[in-house]
Image (cartoon, rainbow, N blue to C red):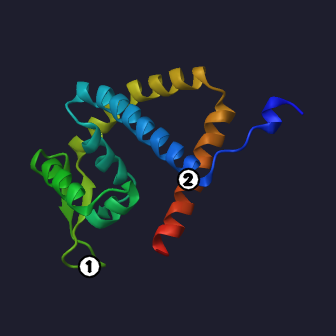
């Protein structure tokens, strides 16, 4: 039998730790990339994330927080900053009187559009490093893992 066939698989706990550490590192790398993409248009990665969450449709702060996997308080702070700078606005929420919706302003949409060329160039550079099928399967695996974590976290 070959050495690789005889090797034991890591334990579930070791796999979980490895996944967590790798995702923390990957998150840091993505944040570094996002900061480098947003800096020229005077945004931050966090501002871009919140604006990006509401590009298609206005959302409440709580909905944005759920979508991004961060606290409502963090999103509220960023949304307030975006509104103060004229990049977003609060709109009435027909589903909930007190939970206003966050929507980008024209200035916010323009700021995100100014990021797009550098974002596209970076995506091309990354895709040239990896096979696009590998990128697609990695995205699928991350989404599957996230869904599983949601399921078991909701159940306690």
Residue under the point 66% across and 34% down: 134
Question: On the image, numbered disc 1 is attached to which residue?
Answer: 96
* Residue drawn at (41%, 29%) of the image: 119
**Quadrant of res 63:** bottom left
Q: Residue at x 24, y 27 (%)?
A: 39
From the viewer's perspective, tell me whether residue 92 is left or right of residue 32.
left
Secondary structure beneath disc 1? loop
**In front here: 83 or 106?**
83
- For image coordinates 86% across by 30% down, the residue present is 2
Position above or below: 10 against 68: above
Residue sitting nearer the eye, 80 or 108 = 80
Q: Residue 21: percent from the left, percent from the top?
A: 46, 41
Disc 2 crowd rating (10 Å Cα; few below 14, some 14-19, many 20+) is few
Q: Position of residue 30 (x, y in %)?
A: 40, 34
Identify the residue under disc 2: 13
Q: Which quarter of the figure is the N terminus placed in?
A: top right
Judged left or right of residue 149, residue 6 is right
Q: Earlier in the sequence, mark 1 or mark 2?
A: 2
Q: Quadrant of residue 138?
A: top right
Q: Alpha-carbon distance for marks 1 and 2?
A: 42 Å
Residue 111, how many percent across, how many down?
26, 36
What secondary structure is found at the residue carrying circle 2?
A: helix
Is 140 displayed left or right of 29 in the figure?
right
State which mark lies toward you, 1 or 2.
Answer: 2
């Amino acid at each position: 039998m070959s050495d690789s066939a005889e090797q034991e698989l890591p334990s579930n706990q070791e796999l979980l730790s490895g996944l967590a550490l790798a995702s923390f590192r990957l998150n840091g790398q993505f944040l570094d990339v996002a900061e480098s993409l947003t800096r020229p248009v005077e945004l931050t990665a966090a501002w871009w994330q919140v604006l990006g969450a509401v590009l298609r449709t206005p959302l409440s702060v709580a909905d944005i927080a759920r979508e991004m996997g961060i606290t409502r308080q963090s999103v509220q702070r960023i949304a307030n900053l975006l509104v103060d700078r004229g990049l977003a606005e609060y709109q009435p929420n027909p589903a909930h009187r007190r939970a206003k919706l966050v929507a980008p302003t024209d200035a916010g949409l323009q700021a995100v559009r100014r990021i797009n060329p550098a974002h596209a160039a970076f995506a091309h550079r990354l895709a040239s490093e990896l096979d696009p099928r590998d990128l697609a399967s990695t995205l699928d695996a991350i989404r599957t893992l996230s869904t599983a974590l949601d399921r078991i976290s909701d159940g306690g």
